[in-house]
Amino acid sequence: MKAIGFKTSLSIEEKDSFIEFETVKPTPGPHDLLVKIDAISVNPVDFKIRQSAAKDTVLETPKIIGWDAVGIVQAVGEKVTLFEVGDLVYYAGDITKQGSNAEYQIIDERIVGNKPTSLTNAEAAAIPLTGLTAWEILFDRIRINPEKDKGKSILIIGGAGGVGSIAIQLAKKIAGLTVIATASRPETIDWCKKQGADFVVDHKNLIESVREAGFQNVDFILDFVDTNAYWDIMAELIKPQGHIASITGSAEPVVLNKLKGKSVSFSWELMYTRSMFQTEDMIEQHHILNKIADLLDEGVLKTTLKETYKGLTAENLKKAHQLLESGKTIGKIAIKF
């Protein structure tokens, strides 16, 4: 099968930052599906791993990355019960295994959903990783209850990005929250409003912007940009007994003491946790993806796809990574095979 990967971590402008190669089609294990991939999308985790996974070394076997895919089930493992050959599926993958930048991939059925029928394959490929991340951070980490929390305020830092775009929709339409999103360019402000944000504020002067929008403090904060850069700001803006959650990690320890006086909770979210640790509730990602598919088919949610490239080529992956690395991406980029 054809695949695209890398043997060493290079700048995306370098000729061999991605290489096309032939490899053996994988064989599914007991709980695995073999999927013939038709469309993928790219995420910031892709370029972060490309930049770090083979630093100062040359891998013997190219590493295949990519963690969003739509495709058709070609074969199933002996213990598979959720899917059959011929099913059209979508998923965000497992960071411990080879990725989706290839013609075929094996994937554990418990982290796979039925592809939304109303979306094209490219539109559906834009959803799994960001949809799972946004759903988990809202409903598994902060544990927002739409009945109890309806009308409360949430600040989403990084509203126009991939996760922010779907998080705005879920927070507004499913959780019933008042959504404040950050953006600064006219095109990103417009995008956030189209996703359903009630207020769009300037991340460059966040405290003042939030208060000018009429909020002294907010009930919840989601950080999709930089935990350390916004830590003091989040500690200032969060309400007493509020909840902050982040996906961005931190090179330096976060100063949790700054939250103590307000009795504020803090959570990390990593979409890969369930698959990395084979958690007892790993199948929950299957259920979440199916719930999101239903909401997309009902028109409650909409795809966050912004741009599509045609063809599984090293050149298209380079273009997509360059755009992601610029930090100016709006919504999601997909590649249709």
Image (tube, rainbow, N blue to C red):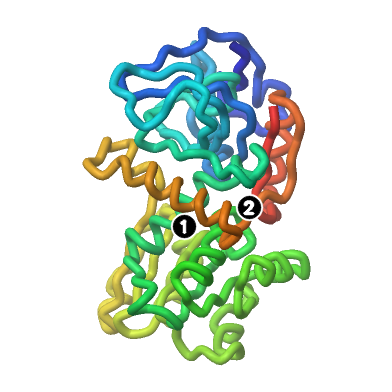
Amino acid bearing label 1: Ala
Mark closest to the chain's N terminus, 2 or 1: 1
Residue count near mark 1 (Cα–Cα under 10 Å), binned few <14, some 14–19, many ≥20: many
Residue 251: percent from left, percent from top: 42, 52
Q: Could you tell whether 323 is left or right of 51 in the image?
A: right
Q: Nearer the viewer, mark 2 or mark 1?
A: 2
Residue 16 relative to residue 270: left or right: right
* Residue 205 drawn at (x, y percent): 61, 79
Amino acid type of the residue that numbered disc 2 sits on in the rendered structure: Thr
Mark 2–mark 1 CB contact (< 8 Å): no
Above or below, 212 relative to 203: below
Q: For residue 22, what is the image quadrant?
A: top right
Residue at x 71%, y 45% (from the top left corner): 323
Nearer to the camera, 129 or 212: 129
Compared with 146, 72 (above or below) is above
Check disc 1 and report its element: helix, strand or loop.
helix
**Measuring 63% from the left and 28% from the top, which residue is drawn there?**
38
- Looking at the image, can residue 165 be seen? no
Mark 2 lies on a secondary structure that is loop
Residue at image mark 2: 303
Quadrant location of the N terminus?
A: top right
Residue at the far left in the pictured view = 280
Image quarter hosting the C terminus: top right
What label does residue 2 carry, if any?
Answer: none
Residue toward you, 49 or 170:
170
Residue 165 at x, y percent in the picture: 59, 60
Residue hosting label 1: 134
Q: Indicate left or right for 161 with 25 as reference.
A: right
Measuring 48% from the left and 30% from the top, which residue is drawn there?
A: 53
Neighbour tally class for label 2: few under 14, some 14-19, many 20 plus, Cα within 10 Å = many
Q: CA distance from mark 2 to mark 1?
A: 14 Å
